Image: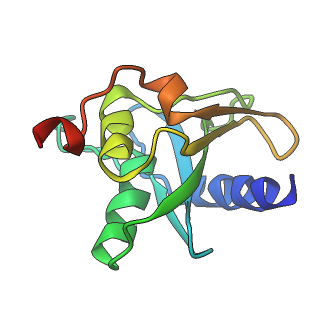
Amino acid sequence: MQKYKDLINKAIAAREGSYSPYSGFMVGAALLTSGGKTYCGCNIENAAFTPANCAERTAFFTAVAAGERDFSAIAVAGWPKGGAPGFAFPCGVCRQVMAEFCRPDFVIIIAAGEDEYKISSLRELLPESFGPADLA
């Protein structure tokens, strides 16, 4: 689907902004809002490790800071600097952030290139999740 390829290409481009001097693992993400806007993010490492931020959360936090709250899809592209492209799925923390802002059918595209990708739903990647509705 063309809209997914555009999103994948934006995630691959966002990967170039990665600050990953410790792991060398560069990740980019492109988050699509239901209104058609795209917010990109890259992973940002830190010598203390715990202050590091994943590309997916960078994209979500940028979008939320801009007032966005309704999301339809995210593309994620990550592999080692200078290495062969591969599939890098969102970590558990990023999946939990997605559960905060997205419906279970939210589309997650994991790309190893424009034409090599896997599509999952949030429900598939985070079954039995805990979210805002659980606090009601």
Question: Residue at horizontal 86%, vertical 59%?
Answer: 2
Which quadrant of the rendered structure holds the C terminus?
Answer: top left
Q: Quarter of the image holding residue 47?
A: top left
For the residue pair 84 and 12, the one nearer the viewer reads as 12
Q: Would residue 19 appear left or right of 2 to someone viewing this image?
A: left
Q: Residue furthest front?
A: 136
Foreground: 68 or 91?
68
Hey, which quadrant is residue 23 in on the image? top left
Q: Give the number of marks.
A: 0
Image point (32%, 26%), residue name = 129
Rendered location of residue 87, percent (x, y): 66, 27
Is the residue 22 above or below the residue 128 in the image? below
Relative image position of residue 63 (x, y in whole percent): 39, 69
Q: Which residue does the image show at 35% across and 53% down from the upper left? A: 101
22 displayed left or right of 24: left
For residue 52, say whether it is visible: yes
Near-viewer residue (46 or 126): 126
User: In this rendering, is residue 108 above or below 120?
Assistant: below
